[in-house]
């Protein structure tokens, strides 16, 4: 067992956050690197988190009337080029297929970086009348963007996501759906991932290629950097005009549809790691923990210990995701491994516990040890999982709030981004030049114009001109 | 409503089975064609079937210890080339990515046609010791094969599937897993899709590129053609030797692993259509029907009718997938549509039914009408769905058996394939030349060497030499 990586220390997050992150994703066995540059293998422990994300997010989608579909992986070059802003945004970072089998293709195909153009091409034939609206479709798939710098989950050449694409009769309907899905995302992050988010609109500079308006949820990682965690776009009728997607309205006139799209990705797993993880490893919110309770027998060769462990597992598996670590590793090793993998609760049970009719439950987040009567195990673990889910969100919210600052002028703004790390709220005149200047000087970007506005000052933090918009600023992943 | 396609007759299956199939997939709104040649859009009604297949198959996998993972979409050319037979089998039909962003790639990448080489590359680093074995991984993804002739679900340039890839310490373990998964497939087809299958081994000629042995389940479509519905391959240590995948055994010597792979695809939806469909449209086995019960109100504007329909839905949705068709179409239209879409049961409820406290349940497969007391609806629909699932399998089995013939010599063999359509059982000497000759003369391929052997004759149906293997032969999709 000396060759096992688990015993090695992982880098402390205060010492080198980036290295800590890399250590976690490898040692918690979430991903592996591959021969394909910039692409990753998502290993069972990582993929099981994604399955739990998918299942719960998909259920929330379906409650709002979303239907799943599957569109092709490839986009013909001429199709990608139909909407001007969109192609400018994506063409520089797509992978091109030029040969099929042994022959060159007549037209290059790109591997989808996102599927607006394919959905438009489909809707063009699928939508005829107002009776066909709205269309509220979604697909779960992988997309490819030829990134230069990559990091597991956060930025990779291929990643998994869902992309919703809808078509509506009016601009109001499209806007309502755009906001509805942003709210689904925000609630999902808070209720399932225990990650608090700031909801707001992207500036013109930061919006999606081809969108009229992009809305975003922004989360703050433990190191004070921002992570864009989900976006929802209102396209107006821009794509519909470019692709000719029209419907016959009740008055029998032809009208263009209004469209939206919205997406979340495997990057959420990166967010879970960076919001909740600690120096012992991953800490998984119970609702996305593939193993919620890990039972670790102590002196497992002693009579009755393993049997009791299996009995507990069989009792618990009705109400939670549970496993017994019955390998021949030492208990101390198993504790470390359970911590590294972020299992929310571990249950320790040994000969003395058997005699006393109790066990010890240890919370991963607080490391609190709770003695528990064996008769109460189901009830107690259920309560603890609920409590932990709730407290993890509270803790993340406190951290986020403690690292959200206010800047009244540029000197203060610059000082905050030099000395602190977090969100900075500041006023903005609405001029792109100010965003450009701030980015150039401080490597800081506008994260969003939050829905919850505050009046911090009368003037723009950059140029000093009158300002009536408050922005969140941050260094972003 | 005159522009709606539903009223048009679909081509009769006896007149033109291929056109009937195309009509069904379009009019039941399972797929749509796209601007991307050979690729399809899987629409909500089609994708919902795939989701039910995935969910139930995945659960069966997990019961046997399968863990899900995700590997890259791309395979570097040098990796694809490592196993000689494998590259020869696949290189002629892959799509090649040659540019990433604006720059040419140093090495071409193919879009995965299957992922043996990627799993090998991964296992090479992931497997060290006998403690790491077995690895029983699976992924759900899309793959690409540059087919010339394509048909929705049956053969397309991109399709959805699952591919399991396992690694074991011994050849026996690999063989056991290969057969175990074949059995999972066969049971899934019979129990969930109501499709009976013949289990057997592929001949050398028909086996998978790089496999030592390929096992298959073969189903018979309504037109008497065969459809290979799932395959399971034992690779021995061939890939392990090509990729250098070794483990330290208990005695501390390095040994090569033994591997398997197994897959099922969206082609199963084609099988469902072609086994169960009729001239009114799709007929879905209840277990994969996204809508199991469709409630159709008669004279829905009369007081109480719609309310009762919704009440029935709310009562039924606890135990089955149910919807009310409350659109403003006529009942007759709704009946046709429910038939076209293959909903297993429809419930008709009108003012007279309300008075009498009953409704009418109509089975999609037999079109039998059952009067049902409103108080008994949950119980009765539950029973009928179970019964229909069972009888659809029995009916398919009877059809399959009635179209399975025996040939003792070549004259008989040729006559059967000229006059009949179905499986033909016949003896084979084991010589590939006979397979080649039969394929050339009759466009017929060996489907499998069934596990259940019969001694039909002493000599090969083709060459007349001594033969001790019985094969299933057929024309295949």
Image (cartoon, coloured by chain):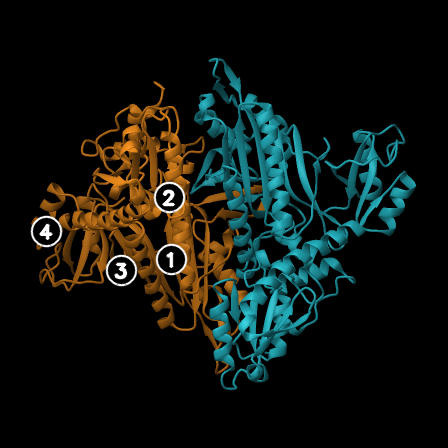
Chain colours: A orange, B cyan
Q: Residue B244's x, y, as percent?
A: 51, 21
Give whichever of discs 2 and 4 has the lower sequence position: 2
Looking at the image, which residue is at 32% across and 35% down?
A341
Specify the label residue A410 is tagged with.
4
Looking at the image, which residue is at 30% across and 59% down?
A215
Q: Residue beneath label 2, please?
A: A316
Q: Quadrant for the C terminus of chain A, please.
A: top left
Residue B91 is at least partly visible in this image: no
Alpha-carbon span between mark 2 and mark 4: 56 Å
Is A97 on the left or on the right of B436, as rendered? left
Badge 1: chain ID: A
Q: Secondary structure at mark 2?
A: helix
> Extreme bottom residue here?
B302
Specify the label residue A426 is tagged with.
none
How crowded pointer 2 is (Cα within 10 Å; few <14, some 14-19, many 20+) is rated as some
Q: Residue B322's x, y, as percent?
A: 52, 66
Alpha-carbon span between mark 3 and mark 2: 44 Å
Residue B218 is at least partly visible in this image: yes
Q: Secondary structure at mark 4?
A: helix
How crowded pointer 3 is (Cα within 10 Å; few <14, some 14-19, many 20+) is rated as many
Q: Secondary structure at mark 3?
A: strand
Give whichever of discs 3 and 1 has the lower sequence position: 3
Give whichever of discs 3 and 2 has the lower sequence position: 3
Q: Nearer the viewer, residue A187 or A287?
A: A287
Q: Residue B469's x, y, as percent?
A: 80, 32
Q: Residue beneath label 1, please?
A: A262
Pointer 1 and pointer 4 on the same chain = yes
Badge 4: chain ID: A
Q: Residue B40's x, y, as percent?
A: 58, 54
Alpha-carbon span between mark 4 and mark 3: 23 Å
Which of the two discs, 3 and 2, sits closer to the camera?
2
């Amino acid at each position: 067992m000396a060759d096992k990586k688990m015993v090695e220390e992982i880098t402390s997050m205060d010492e080198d956050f980036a290295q800590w992150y890399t250590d976690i994703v490898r040692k918690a066995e979430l991903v592996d690197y591959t021969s394909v540059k910039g692409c990753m293998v998502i290993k069972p422990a990582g993929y099981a988190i994604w399955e739990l994300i998918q299942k719960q997010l998909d259920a929330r989608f379906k409650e709002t009337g979303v239907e799943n579909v599957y569109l092709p992986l490839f986009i013909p070059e001429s199709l990608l080029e139909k909407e001007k802003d969109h192609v400018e945004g994506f063409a520089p970072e797509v992978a091109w297929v030029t040969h099929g089998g042994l022959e060159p293709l007549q037209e290059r195909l790109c591997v989808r970086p996102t599927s607006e153009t394919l959905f438009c091409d489909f809707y063009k034939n699928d939508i005829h009348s107002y009776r066909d609206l709205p269309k509220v479709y979604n697909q779960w798939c992988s997309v490819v963007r030829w990134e230069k710098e990559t990091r597991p989950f956060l930025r990779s050449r291929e990643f998994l996501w869902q992309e919703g694409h809808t078509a509506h009769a009016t601009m109001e309907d499209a806007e309502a759906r755009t906001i509805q899905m942003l709210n689904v995302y925000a609630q999902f992050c808070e209720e399932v991932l225990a990650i608090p988010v700031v909801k707001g609109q992207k500036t013109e500079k930061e919006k999606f290629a081809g969108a009229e308006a992009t809305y975003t949820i922004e989360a703050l990682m433990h190191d004070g950097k921002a992570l864009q965690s989900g976006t929802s776009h209102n396209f107006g009728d821009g794509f519909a005009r470019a692709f000719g997607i029209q419907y016959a309205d009740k008055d029998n006139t032809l009208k263009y549809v209004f469209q939206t799209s919205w997406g979340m990705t495997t990057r959420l797993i990166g967010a879970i790691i960076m919001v909740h993880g600690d120096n012992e490893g991953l800490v998984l919110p119970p609702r996305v923990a593939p193993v919620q309770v890990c039972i670790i027998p102590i002196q497992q060769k002693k009579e009755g210990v393993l049997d009791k462990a299996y009995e507990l597992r069989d009792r618990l598996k009705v109400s939670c995701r549970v496993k017994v670590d019955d390998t021949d590793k030492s208990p101390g090793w198993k504790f470390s491994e359970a911590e590294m993998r972020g299992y929310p609760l571990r249950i320790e049970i040994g000969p003395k516990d058997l005699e006393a009719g109790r066990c010890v439950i240890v919370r991963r987040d607080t490391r609190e040890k709770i003695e528990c009567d064996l008769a109460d195990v189901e009830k107690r673990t259920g309560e603890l999982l609920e409590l932990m889910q709730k407290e993890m969100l509270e803790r993340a919210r406190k951290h986020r709030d403690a690292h959200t600052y206010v800047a009244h002028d540029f000197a203060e703004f610059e000082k905050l981004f030099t000395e602190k790390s977090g969100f900075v709220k500041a006023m903005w005149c609405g001029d792109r030049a100010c965003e450009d200047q701030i980015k150039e000087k401080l490597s800081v970007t506008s994260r969003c114009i939050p829905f919850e506005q505050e009046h911090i000052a009368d003037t723009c933090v950059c140029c000093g001109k009158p300002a009536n918009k408050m922005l969140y600023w941050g260094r972003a992943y």
